[in-house]
Image (tube, grey):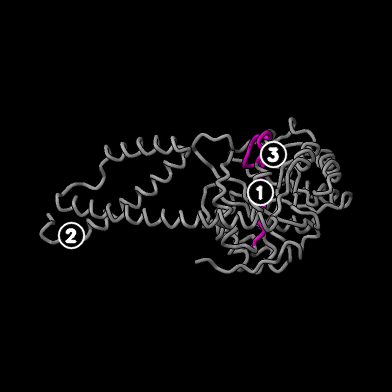
């Protein structure tokens, strides 16, 4: 059961009339010249109203560039003063929050490494207190929707109502073209649970490769996300952090120019055809659920038969045969191997659970 969130609509606190929301700026603030050159380039793009920059960088290993620290906040003050853009930084502890607020930072965000720590999130929320500042919350590194929701709920219950979720992808150990797998089903579920919570996408961290960014930007907007936060640098090849996933302001302008903003609804003919297709899906889903229920009934019978004959539940030879045969059949029908495997694993897991339940209803005479 999800808690109700009290969220202020984006349009009530962010003076941005252009949709979608575009937040852009370097992964790290490196020098005042780098920050200002990037900011001037972005200020020429009408859609960009918020400038982002990492001031404190949580690196995996010591010795890497960990940000310029508090001194870089003065550069962001200058960006705000000279370009009129709002400015945003990542915070990971109370000292970061205090420094950012002292320098007039407009928006804070909590990174993927921090969001997994309820103590850190609590301390950040307590430090903000009743100061009416927006906070953006990135998803955790691992695909854990509950942890993401927990951080959002914690801040909201502390009185913070100007909240935005940021989808930056998830660590994924299978081969993938992406640095962090999009796993769109997770942000979509968050959007379903909390339709009033603004949700933006970070294509830079999802992709890890600037060549993939346009596709993710288009996908995000096709899925009705509220905007994007994208890393831009006036000279990405010289960037001190994440140079491969940063783009120039000119490249951002090119991406935005070619991104298609689709309508949420179409004309009457479109609506009728869409409703017809959705009705067909509804019928197929009903049939699918009925078939799955019938399958589990058969599985329960098998479990009972195994119990009577004192046979173990897991039969690896049979399971391997099923995987091979079903995947081959699915591929011939145009389904992907990954989808069939995921489906089979879910069905098999439920089948095992069902058989264990049958086995647990033992008669005393059957025990050793």
Q: Mark 1 or 3 closer to N-term?
A: 3
The residue beneath circle 1 is 222
- Dot 3 falls on a residue whose secondary structure is helix
Disc 1 vs disc 3: Cβ atoms closer than 8 Å? Answer: no
For the view shown, which residue lies furthest in the top direction?
237
- Dot 1 falls on a residue whose secondary structure is helix
> Real-space Cα distance between discs 2 and 1?
53 Å
Q: Badge 3, how many Cα within 10 Å: few under 14, some, many 20+?
A: some
The residue beneath circle 2 is 362
Quadrant of residue 161 in the image?
bottom right
For the view shown, which residue lies furthest in the right direction?
82
Q: Mark 2 or 1 closer to N-term?
A: 1
Pick the front one: 360 or 129: 360
Please check the rendered image and state whether residue 137 is part of the magenta-colored stretch, yes or no: no
Q: Position of residue 356 (x, y in %)?
A: 26, 54
The residue beneath circle 3 is 214
Q: Residue placed at 60% from the left, 68% from the top?
A: 157
Q: Is residue 158 above or below residue 101?
A: below
Magenta region: 197-215
Q: Is residue 57 above or below residue 3?
A: above
Pick the front one: 83 or 131: 83
Q: Residue placed at 77% from the left, 60% from the top?
A: 14
Q: Is residue 342 left or right of residue 92?
A: left
Q: Mark 3 or 2 closer to N-term?
A: 3
Tell me, yes or no, if residue 116 can be seen here: yes
> Real-space Cα distance between discs 3 and 2?
58 Å
Q: Position of residue 337 (x, y in %)?
A: 45, 37
Q: Position of residue 181 (x, y in %)?
A: 56, 42
Pick the front one: 207 or 93: 207
Q: Residue placed at 42% from the left, 46% from the top?
A: 343
Q: Position of residue 138 (x, y in %)?
A: 62, 52
Q: Is residue 200 above or below residue 328?
A: below
């Amino acid at each position: 059961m999800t808690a109700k969130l009290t969220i202020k609509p984006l349009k009530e606190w962010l003076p941005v009339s252009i949709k979608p929301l575009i937040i852009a700026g370097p992964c790290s603030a490196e020098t005042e010249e780098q920050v200002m050159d990037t900011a001037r380039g972005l200020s020429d793009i009408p859609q960009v109203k918020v400038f982002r920059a990492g001031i404190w960088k949580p690196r995996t290993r010591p010795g890497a560039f960990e940000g310029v620290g508090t001194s870089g906040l003065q550069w962001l003050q200058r960006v705000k003063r000279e370009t009129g853009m709002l400015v945003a930084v990542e915070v990971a502890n109370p000292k970061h929050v205090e420094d950012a607020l002292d320098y007039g930072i407009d928006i804070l965000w909590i990174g993927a490494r921090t969001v997994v720590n309820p103590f850190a999130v609590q301390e950040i929320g307590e430090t903000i207190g009743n100061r009416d500042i927006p906070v953006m919350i990135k998803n955790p590194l691992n695909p854990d929707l509950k942890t993401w929701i927990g951080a959002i709920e914690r801040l909201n219950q502390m009185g913070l109502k100007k909240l935005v979720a940021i989808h930056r992808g998830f660590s994924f150990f299978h081969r993938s073209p992406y640095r962090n797998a999009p796993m769109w089903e997770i942000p979509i579920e968050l959007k379903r649970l909390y339709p009033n919570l603004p949700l933006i996408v970070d294509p830079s961290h999802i992709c890890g490769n600037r060549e993939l960014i346009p596709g993710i930007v288009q996908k995000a907007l096709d899925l009705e996300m509220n905007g994007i936060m994208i890393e831009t640098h006036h000279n990405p090849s010289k960037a001190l952090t994440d140079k491969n996933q940063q783009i120039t302001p000119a490249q951002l302008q090119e991406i935005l120019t070619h991104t298609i903003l689709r309508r949420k609804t179409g004309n009457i003919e479109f609506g009728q055809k869409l409703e017809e297709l959705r009705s067909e899906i509804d019928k197929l889903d009903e049939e699918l659920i009925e078939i799955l229920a019938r399958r589990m009934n058969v599985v329960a019978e098998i479990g009972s038969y195994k119990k009577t004959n004192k046979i173990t539940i897991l039969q690896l030879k049979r399971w391997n045969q099923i995987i091979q045969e079903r995947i081959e059949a699915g591929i011939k029908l145009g389904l992907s191997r990954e989808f069939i495997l995921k489906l089979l694993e879910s069905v098999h897991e439920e089948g095992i659970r069902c058989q264990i339940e049958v086995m647990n209803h033992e008669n005393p005479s059957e025990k050793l």
